[in-house]
């Protein structure tokens, strides 16, 4: 899809880059440069949209002529928000917590132009985990894959063995929801 | 996962190879060499398991010391079975037929050893399509991507723009269901 402005992805996630290329967009990448600390006093489903807006705004203030796409993904179960684990022990604890249950994955997406947020939204998918043995979870943490992923797993990697099934957009779970992203960019289709 | 026997994937689908490697298996590839004509007088959800068995058996008769994994994927809507399109016109007609509706994707998986089928099963996922314009569908067919895919789309490619959401295993839609494959191979875990 050709756009009326240059497109910049405000994310260094290789998964988001892969999804946006898969959809056929040409774009460049800029680090979002935003503290990803989860803001207090926000409902779990509001956090990723607010963080996505902060990421898009940060880059937009430096690149005012480009469309800036920001995104943020969080895993939520029982009102507990799971971001990226800080240590292998925290990753293992997250995976134990998710085992045998269905959690929600929210990705907020925001579009900025000229230093302002133009539009944003949030997508939700449900992911059901198999109950795995402690040994299998430990072996998975040892691969290192969980460490830079919200909820400590990659659905498109070795972590696929954890997943019984999903409901919603698979690419949302990977980091960038397809229909929400297309809807935000459709307005700027050349 | 280490297995008690060498593993052979009886499929030349690069998607199935990618999924099996993602899960951490070491294996070689052999062409299934089976006519993929859809057998008559079978219910739609029986066809992929029967074809997966035929593919695994064919290779097993030549490689009796190896575990042979066969798979077959079909798209079903309103009792109509959609295999791979023969022409771009047929691809376009399939995409029009699927638009705005929810279809089922069945992948049969079969495991053979010593020239016999050891175990097999079938997984089902539901995929909901957005209603797209004729122009967008034609542009998609022109990319060539639909031609070697059941139902004329690749959910993990440009075709992701067609999909509103799924219910079940994403990798089943891509060609190899994760939990069914792991369950069949678990018995031969070393």
Image (cartoon, coloured by chain):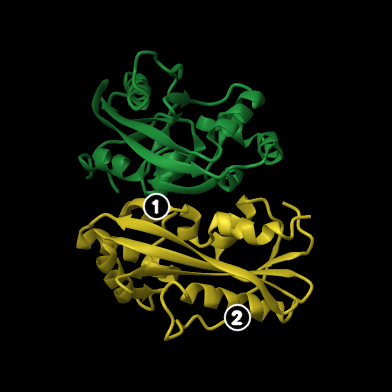
Chain colours: A green, B yellow
In the image, residue B153 lies at what x, y percent? 38, 63
Q: Are marks 1 and 2 in contact (CB under 8 Å)?
A: no
Q: Quadrant of residue A33?
A: top left
Vertical side of A155 occupied by A41: above or below: above
Residue labelled with disc 2: B33
Label 2 is found on which chain of the structure?
A: B
Vertical side of B42 occupied by A4: above or below: above
Residue labelled with disc 1: B167
Vertical side of A153 occupied by B35: above or below: below
In the image, residue B97 lies at what x, y percent? 26, 68
Image point 56% across, 55% down: which residue?
B178
Image point 76% across, 58% down: which residue?
B3
In the image, residue B121 lies at what x, y percent? 56, 67
Task: Count residues near mark 1 (Cα–Cα under 10 Å), then give few for <14, some for 14-19, many for 20+.
Answer: many
Image point 65% across, 81% down: which residue?
B58
State the SS at label 2.
Answer: loop
Measured Cα–Cα span from mark 1 to mark 2: 32 Å
């Amino acid at each position: 899809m050709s756009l009326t402005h240059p497109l910049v992805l405000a994310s260094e996630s290789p998964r988001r880059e892969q999804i946006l290329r898969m959809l056929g967009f040409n774009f460049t990448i800029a680090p979002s440069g935003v503290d990803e600390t989860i803001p207090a006093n926000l409902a779990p489903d509001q956090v990723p949209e607010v963080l996505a807006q902060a990421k898009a705004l940060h880059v937009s203030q430096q690149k005012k002529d480009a469309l800036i796409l920001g995104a943020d993904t969080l895993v939520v179960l029982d009102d507990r928000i799971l971001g990226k684990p800080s240590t292998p022990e925290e990753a293992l604890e997250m995976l134990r917590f998710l085992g045998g249950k269905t959690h929600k994955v929210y990705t907020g997406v925001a579009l900025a132009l000229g230093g302002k947020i133009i539009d944003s939204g949030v997508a939700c998918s449900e992911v059901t985990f198999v109950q795995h043995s402690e040994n299998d979870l430990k072996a998975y943490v040892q691969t290192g894959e969980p460490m830079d992923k919200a909820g400590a797993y990659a659905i498109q990697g070795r972590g696929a063995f954890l997943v019984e099934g999903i409901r919603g957009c698979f690419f949302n779970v990977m980091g960038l929801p397809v229909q929400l992203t297309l809807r935000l960019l459709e307005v700027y289709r050349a």
